[in-house]
Image (cartoon, rainbow, N blue to C red):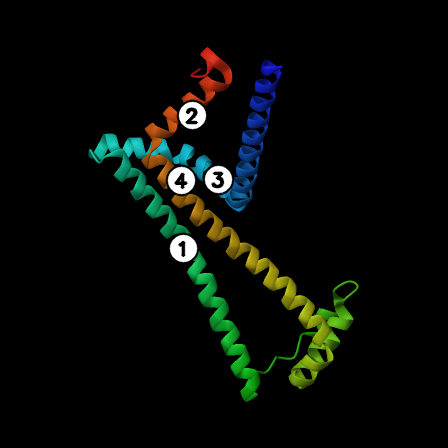
């Protein structure tokens, strides 16, 4: 009876600990879920660039950590350039369009008649552009729904491109951290593989 009681107590303790660990793992996964893809991309970029860091280390005598940091910084700067140019261009263009509409200084040239030859939409597009060239404010009001739809799709595309640049910037920074600690990452990967597969883990 005593043995059964002790077994029941151990089983309850084990169940409570397993449940607590499960809840902890679930919470950790929920927190890290948005960053999993960034970390995976960081690992891929680190794997691709680490031989370059080793080559820089061999040729310049720079430490692997400094060479890895240098590569990461260069990668971030190369990605920041187009992102800043894109953001600046959109802001400038939008400001100019809004200012022009407010001041009435924007005018559209009359379209060429050859535009009507475009299959299916040529005539309608030509008529809309002729109307817009004569009365741009009226055209904006008349085709407001179509303009909103187009602007929404364009904004979604631009946002996707900008988000992609931001993700790659973060992934490149993560890659720099991986490369700077490559030896520790390798040792940790070997240890994990060894625990999962036994003697063949290192292979």
Q: Mark 4 near mark 2, Cβ–Cβ under 8 Å?
A: no
Q: Is residue 136 above or below residue 184?
A: below
* Residue that numbered label 2 is attached to: 189
For the N terminus, the image quarter is: top right
Label 4, on which residue?
175
**Cα–Cα span, label 3 and label 4:** 8 Å
Which residue shows up at 44% across the image and 57% down it?
A: 82
Lower sequence index among marks 1 and 4? 1
Disc 3 packing (10 Å; few <14; some 14–19; many ≥20):
some
Say what secondary structure mark 1 lies in.
Answer: helix
Asked whether the residues under the numbered discs 3 and 4 touch, taking CB atoms below 8 Å apart as contact, a structural biologist would say yes
Query: In this picture, is 12 found above or below 133?
Result: above
Dots 1, 3 in contact, CB < 8 A: no
Towards the viewer: 150 or 178: 178
Q: Please tell me whether mark 1 or mark 4 is closer to you in this view.
A: 4
Of the 4 image quadrants, the one containing the C terminus is top left
Residue occupying the point 72% across, 73% down: 145
Left or right: 17 in relation to 181: right
Task: Give the residue at mark 1.
Answer: 80
Q: Classify mark 2: residues with Cα within 10 Å, few (<14), some (14-19) or many (20+).
A: some
User: Which of the two discs, 3 and 2, labels the residue nearer the N terminus?
Assistant: 3
Name the residue that disc number 3 marks.
41
């Amino acid at each position: 009876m005593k043995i059964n009681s002790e077994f029941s107590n151990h089983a309850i303790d084990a169940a409570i600990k397993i449940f607590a660990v499960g809840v902890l793992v679930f919470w950790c996964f929920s927190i890290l879920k948005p960053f999993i893809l960034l970390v995976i991309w960081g690992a891929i970029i680190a794997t691709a660039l680490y031989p370059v860091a080793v080559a820089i280390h061999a040729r310049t005598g720079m430490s692997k950590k400094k060479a890895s940091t240098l590569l990461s910084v260069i990668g971030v700067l190369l990605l920041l350039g187009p992102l800043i140019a894109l953001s600046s261009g959109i802001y400038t263009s939008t400001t100019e369009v809004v200012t022009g509409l407010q001041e009435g200084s924007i005018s559209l040239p009359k379209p060429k008649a050859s535009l009507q030859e475009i299959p299916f939409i040529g005539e309608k597009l030509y008529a809309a552009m002729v109307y817009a060239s004569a009365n741009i404010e009226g055209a904006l009001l008349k085709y407001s729904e179509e303009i909103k739809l187009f602007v929404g799709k364009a904004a979604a595309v631009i946002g996707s491109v900008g988000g992609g640049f931001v993700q790659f910037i973060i992934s490149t920074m993560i890659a720099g951290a991986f490369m700077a600690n490559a030896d520790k990452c390798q040792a940790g990967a070997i240890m994990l593989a060894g625990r999962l597969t036994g003697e063949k883990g290192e292979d």
